[in-house]
Amino acid sequence: MTDLPGIVITGASGRMGQMLINTVLGSDKCKLVGAIERTGHDWVGRDVGEAMGGLTNGVIVTDDALEAFSRAQAVIDFTAPAATVAFSALAAQAHCVHVIGTTGMTDDDISKLGAAAHHCTIVRAGNMSLGVNLLTKITKMVAQALDDDFDIEVVEAHHNRKVDAPSGTALMLGEAAAEGRGVILADVSESGRDGITGARTRGDIGFSAIRGGDVVGEHDVMFLGDGERIILRHVASDRSLFAKGALKAALWGQTQKPGEYDMMDVLGL
Ligand SMILES: NC(=O)C1=CN([C@@H]2O[C@H](COP(=O)(O)OP(=O)(O)OC[C@H]3O[C@@H](n4cnc5c(N)ncnc54)[C@H](O)[C@@H]3O)[C@@H](O)[C@H]2O)C=CC1
Ligand SMILES: O=C(O)C1=N[C@H](C(=O)O)C[C@H](O)C1
């Protein structure tokens, strides 16, 4: 039992944090050794099981990330961009695998992960589910097969607490479509249409975001031609699939060399 890899969960009180804690506690392949929240959060100092409304489990929520990481083999991090950049430096110092689910990271944030990846294994993906990663592959294939006669639009829907748009998944799908077309997404990306926008530019990849209620995550990639449309869709109905994917990545990362990886690598897609 003691030889099982120890996992730390950051953002312990969050929607994904709590799901991840339950997933780790329910696994016979790893053990929970730490739970992190931001300084000043009212969970800091409390037993995480009790804070989640259940039985105590002996893991006390802390804001001392480096101390917790130094007792762990992997950190699973679904928090916010600035926190994730800071955690990556600490995970590198502690030589832990860093699994990153956080979305909304800028190019500058992502470039900062590069230094940490010299010392530790980083697995980062905007979506940890098998279905979305497969959809990403399929999107690239379809985009490769069709030309600009088909307009590409990515439409996503999420719950009303989500703070970033387009979603990390939508951007993954957009990147895949752009790769399939042999173009750079930044050169053709179109989002936030409003007002007199003019006609659609041929070759653009459009993004639309719906926010409301408790939607877990839905993504459509639409290829719209004259007289026909192809619509590829993924619907997530339970956050546990992201948590299971992240845990798979944390365990996979135990045998990898330092560097930056994604869920395609983990899933062998
Ligand atoms: N890649 C994937 O498969 C998925 C990614 N996500 C992403 O995960 C992130 C979190 O999503 P939710 O759990 O829904 O958000 P949330 O708002 O419920 O949770 C975020 C948690 O991070 C904590 N946090 C923020 N800064 C911190 C810091 N400096 N130190 C420690 N904790 C800190 C907050 O206190 C909060 O508990 C978002 O970026 C979301 O898009 C969500 C689901 C799946
Ligand atoms: O914030 C969320 O909830 C989700 N975020 C990820 C994203 O931005 O794509 C993954 C999933 O769709 C849920």
Image: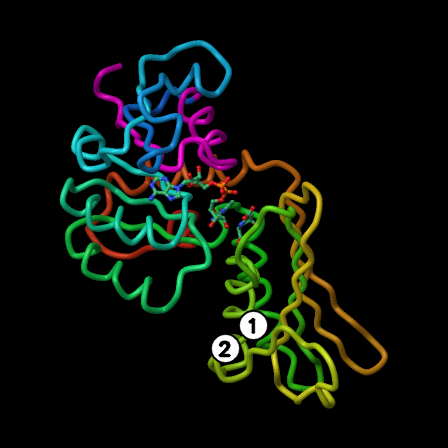
Confirm if mark 1 falls within 8 A of ligand 2. no
Q: Nearer the viewer, residue 163 or 219?
A: 163
Give residue 158's position: percent from left, percent from top.
64, 50
Give residue 165's position: percent from left, percent from top.
56, 61
Query: Which residue is tagged 2?
Result: 185
Question: Would you place residue 138 above or below residue 163 in this image?
Answer: below
Q: Residues within 10 Å of mark 2 (few under 14, many from 20)?
A: some
Residue 165 falls within the magenta-colored stretch: no
Q: Quadrant of the N terminus?
A: top left
Give residue 105's position: percent from left, percent from top.
40, 60
Residue 21 falls within the magenta-colored stretch: yes
- Which structural element holds mark 2? helix
Confirm if mark 2 falls within 8 A of ligand 2. no
| Mark sitting on residue 177 | 1
Q: Residues within 10 Å of mark 1 (few under 14, many from 20)?
A: many
Q: Residue at x 59, y 46 (%)?
A: 161
- Which badge, 1 or 2, is on the more N-terminal residue? 1
Q: Is residue 115 left or right of residue 153?
A: left
Marks 1 and 2 in Cβ contact (< 8 Å): yes
Residue 185 in view, yes or no: yes
- Which structural element holds mark 1? helix
Answer with the quarter of the image where residue 142 lies: bottom right
Front disc: 1 or 2: 2
Kind of residue at disc 1: Ala
Spatial separation of the CA atoms under disc 1 and disc 2: 8 Å
Answer with the quarter of the image where residue 146 lies: bottom right
Q: Nearer the viewer, residue 245 or 67?
A: 67
| Mark sitting on residue 262 | none
Give residue 213's position: percent from left, percent from top.
71, 44
The magenta region covers 1-26
